[in-house]
Amino acid sequence: MTFRGWPSEALEFYERLDADNSKTYWTAHQSFYEEQARGPMRELLADLEPEFGAGKI
């Protein structure tokens, strides 16, 4: 996979999380985070790994 950036919905997720940083909110939106925020971060780290080594989230 190649990193193509984060979708705007991922940025909105972080804004909503900032407004409601509760376990209830997190649990309800965890799958969205995994797909729309963490997924692209994994792609970015994979693209950068040859030059900078393995990254961690």
Image: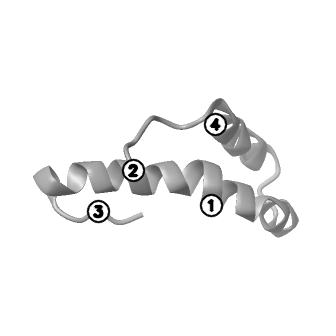
Q: Please, what is the three-letter code of the amino acid marked with disc 2?
A: Met
| Image side of residue 10 versus residue 30, left or right | left
Q: Which residue is mark 3?
A: 55
Look at mark 1 in the image and give the residue it sits on: 34
Q: Which residue is mark 4?
A: 11
Q: Position of residue 11 (x, y in %)?
A: 64, 36
The amino acid on which the numbered mark 3 sits, given as a three-letter code, is Gly
Image position of 22 (left or right of 49): right
Judging by the rendered image, the residue that carries numbered circle 2 is 1
Q: Amino acid at mark 4?
A: Leu
- The disc at residue 47 is none
**Horizontal and vertical percent for residue 27?**
81, 68
Percent coordinates x, y for residue 3 in the rendering? 40, 42
Rendered image quadrant of residue 6: top right
Q: Earlier in the sequence, mark 4 or mark 3?
A: 4
Q: Residues within 10 Å of mark 1 (few under 14, many from 20)?
A: few
Q: Quadrant of residue 23?
A: bottom right
Q: Amino acid at mark 1?
A: Glu
Q: CA distance from mark 3 to mark 2?
A: 16 Å
* Residue at image coords 60%, 35%: 7
